[in-house]
Image: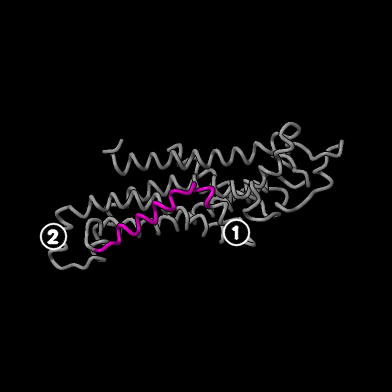
Amino acid sequence: MLGAAIVLALVAFAVFGPLAAHHGPLQSDFVRGVSPSGTPVGPNADFPLGADRLFRDEFARLAVAGRLSLFIAVAATSIASALGAAVGIVAGWYEGSRVPVDGALMRFADVMLAFPFLMLVMAIGAALDRTSAITILVTLGATGWLGIARILRAKTMQVRGLEYVEASRALGQSTPRVMMKHVLPNIAGPLVVTATVMVAQMVVADSVLSYLGVGIAPPTPTWGRMLFESQDDVMSSPWLFAAPATAILLAVWGFNMLGEGLRDALDPRET
């Protein structure tokens, strides 16, 4: 419940936050955004989270960055879940058969898992000449399906031996129909739980890419880029660093707790 509340609050902030802001995320205010000493103003009525070095509204930038980061995380997770489900079901179904599908798919997954996820994503991101939200989410989705595939492979191996699955095969139903009608609904619970937790991982991965400069290019705000731009002002303007750091922390915490809650609700035997 708490995880769901945090996630809903972040989504509401990302959707309605820019509407409540007094300035646009790319708009510099050289009148109200400048303090008497010539530095960016701190939190006040016009700038709830202060202004950055270019006198832009940190609140508006944080909300727009949240909208982009959450969209990339959810879209990348959807791609990874679809790929992982397809590979996991096929590999689990043909495990132990004469068709060498399982061995080929799992060996490929093992090779990919040998590379740290963030290192692999950063290498692909650095190889792209120009990154956009689409290229980032496709990159994250295409490299994030490995863990899901292994989990669903094990679940598929359990389901395929159930009596009603054997009965469906004996009645002459095709393999794709059995997979869609009987296997997929029975592994949907673990898939939903794993995908929910993976959204948190995608938020971190997207933030790391932006922080290291291989994510979406400025001036488009992202949580990782906002961390990078504010790291030199931690002592003088700590709120500039604390705002994106807190947003990332809440997103990771919220989606992880939501995933744990869904696991307890969908599969009480594993609590």
Q: Which mark is residue 167?
A: 2
Q: Is residue 18 left or right of residue 113?
A: right
Q: Nearer the viewer, residue 146 or 109?
A: 109
Colour theme: one colour
Residue identifier under label 1: 127
Q: Is residue 243 left or right of residue 270?
A: right
| Label 2 environment density (alpha carbons within 10 Å; few <14, some 14–19, many ≥20) | few
Q: Quadrant of the C terminus?
A: top left
Question: Which secondary structure type mostly characterizes the magenta part of the structure?
Answer: helix
Residue at image x 35%, y 55%? 106
Could you say whether the residue bearing mark 2 is in a helix, strand or loop? helix
> Magenta part of the protein: which range?
99-120
Q: Is residue 46 left or right of residue 126?
A: right
For marks 1 and 2 on the same chain, the one whose residue lies earlier in the sequence: 1
Q: Is residue 249 magenta?
A: no
Q: Nearer the viewer, residue 188 or 58?
A: 188
Q: Is residue 269 left or right of residue 169?
A: right
Residue at image x 40%, y 59%? 83
The amino acid marked with disc number 1 is Ala
Task: Place residue 164 in its image quadrant.
Answer: bottom left
Q: Nearer the viewer, residue 95 or 52?
A: 95
Q: Position of residue 55 (x, y in %)?
A: 78, 46
